[in-house]
Image: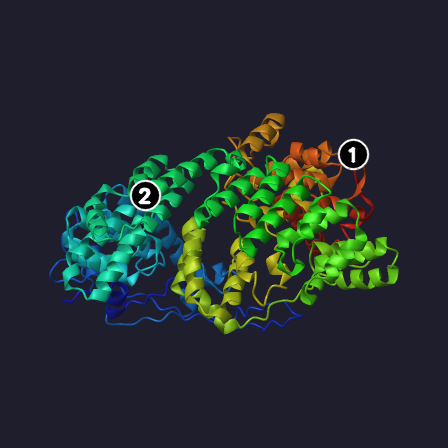
Amino acid sequence: MVNTSFIEKIRKNGAVFTGLVVAAFAMNTVSAHDNSMAVDDTLLWDIQLERQAQEHSEKEAERLDLNGPSTGPVSALLGLLEKQDARTQNVGNSDMESGFQLLIKPWGILIDAKLEAQREAFLEIEGMINRREYTNAQEAMLEIRDYPLFPYLEGALLEKNIRMANESVISEFLNEHSGLPIARSLRTDWLHFLRRNNDAERFLRDYEPQSSLLLQCQALRYRYRSLESLSASEQNSFWQDVTAFWTHGESLPSACDSLFSIWADAGYRTEEVVWQRIQLALNARQNSLVRYLSRFISKEQQDLLSLQRRVQANPRVVQRYHEFTAKNEVTQNMVLSALSRLRWDDHWGTISAWEHYQTTLSFSAAETEQMNADIAVTLALRGEPEAIEWFQRLPIAAMSSSVQQWYLASLLEQQRFDVINEFILALPSAAQQEPQWLYWRGRALAEMGMLEDSTELLVKASQTRNYYGFMASARMSLPANLQHQSTTLVVDKLRDISRRPEALRARELLHHGRLLDARREWNMLRARASEDEQVLIAVLASEWGWHDQAIFGLAGTPAVNDVARRFPLAYAALLQAQSDIVDIDPAWAFAIARRESSFQPDAVSPVGARGLMQVMPATAEYINRRSPSLTTSRGGRFRLDDPEDNVRMGTQYLAELHHRFDGNWLLATAAYNAGSNRVREWIPETAMPADLWIELIPYQETRDYVKAVLAYQQIYAMLLGNNANVLQPLVRMQITSGG
């Protein structure tokens, strides 16, 4: 019998691969003004029963041979030959009581007794495979072959039984399920197996780009074997691939040394290529590799490399002007890099060195503008009034958003409202209409006594849904404008998307708490969908309560104004209850969680913060010591990936910060991101309006964070039924260390 894929084999035998049984239902079309959805639960489901498979024969040996001569890969995998009933059975109302009872939103997905049993069986079979009880696993798998996560079991079973006898099953599985996480893992294991067996033909046939340097190396070695049979252009392409692989910032597998030797003898290891790899190695701090590579460059380049390494160790070396006289690109890049680092420790010394090198070296206009901008920003961060002069050396139209921000901050610190007005008027006309510049030009004109023009700009800004819009609303005593527009849904398309294999697998992985694999499946669904389906995919995630994927999916789409889905009341009972316990505004807690994790319970930041409210383990330990009764409802050690523990810790910490800063929730918000000590360093001795202080927060991350949380707090206050302008207290708030 010719081998066929698993699903094709199932279909050929008459079974129906439906995964989750999806209810057919009618729904009212949702307009931009009506976000209600009506499900007609009087409709009947047409559920086709799978045909009954009949077991036979003796159990196979625990070590599987999946390529029996008379079976396809699936029947071999299951260890059984299936005999199907001749009848096709249709299910009527009497067979469906569990389905009617367990129908749940979203989107008519039927959670019936069969699906619940399949979910339990899936976990049991995984355990069998891990315990190497392959025969029992095979038999159990036959009963859930239409379960969406069946490929994960099939792949896990194959991973435990990689050998040449199972080649056809493995190849078909890889072809059938390319892109699935389990298929990528299986492919990597299979390629390592083929490498160990020195099977070049099969290795190259099944090879796809891998992260493993060893496998990348092996692919090049096998390709080299057939190099002579290639055309001249194909041979050149091969050597270019070797060059790209060799140009790596870390050491490469020794297995490729012989190939690299041939490559070098052919003249491809040029000084330019070697220098490029040296730069990568320097950036990766691979000093031993740098020393090794230095033998392949000229004495002149070795001297340059020695100077570069000294500069890398100490940027003050750049102030020894006599060592940087060579007028070449390498020297100039070295000087620019050193000055960019030196400016943080010695901005006046950096300015002196920069003025010197502008007379001795030839920098491009772009390089000159960038260094001038770096110096200006550094001076602004240090609070130096000379920053304004350096900003004014730059063409305003060429300023990045970050440079514009720091120019604004410098002008605000000096209270140069007249120059702020001129600066904003010099921006491109489209930029002038952005909320930030509408707000600050309005504020500047008000300070200059031009109240009528100021009012016009602030009213215009108040019509936007962001920090500046809400601040303008507060300043003008206008209601905040959410600009909410419900997403218009195309029911048939949404139902179709919910039935796609990637969606079905993602939903089951969500059920099992396997969020990483669920996101991988969801990303695959999005990648394979058309552009006009992206909004519906995000809406489906929202309907499933998969809030982070809904938030990420709606960003940058035409549905960006669907506030209810972009700002869900996720974990509402938990957040409100814990906020009440510690006496903080629940809208504040919602805003923090939305900003910190987009309600992703397994979120982990690069610095180790975890969970919904991104609590650091050290902070959790601190809260635990102070309030052990608040640690966990389970009576054990807290878990920051558990929403209940995380929210309990996060809200308790917010309440403590609120108390530390004498009830100033603005400072507490900044401290939640940057820490209390840093925030205290930023508080001026002389009183400063709150909106000015926010613009002068030296850390861009914290500055953006505070603006976002304040805006989100306004949104959540309104979603929770409070239409007051939450930012009103900031209008008259003064920030000062004097109290």
Identify the image quadrant of residue 566: bottom right
The circle drawn on residue 71 is none
Say which amino acid is labelled 1: Glu
Give, as a three-letter code, the residue at label 2.
Ser
> From the image, which quarter does the N terminus lie in?
bottom left
Seen from this angle, which residue lies furthest left? 69
Q: Is residue 55 visible?
A: no
Q: Say which label, 1 or 2, has the lower sequence index.
A: 2
Q: Position of residue 499 (x, y in %)?
A: 42, 66
Q: Judge whether residue 638 can be spotted in this image.
A: yes
Instruction: Give the secondary structure at mark 2.
Output: loop
| Residue 494 image position (x, y, % from top left) | 50, 69
Residue bearing the label numbered 1: 685
Q: Please name the residue that numbered disc 2 is placed on.
A: 298
Query: Dot 1: what SS?
Result: loop
Callout 1 environment at 10 Å: few (<14), some (14 to 19), or many (20+)?
Answer: few
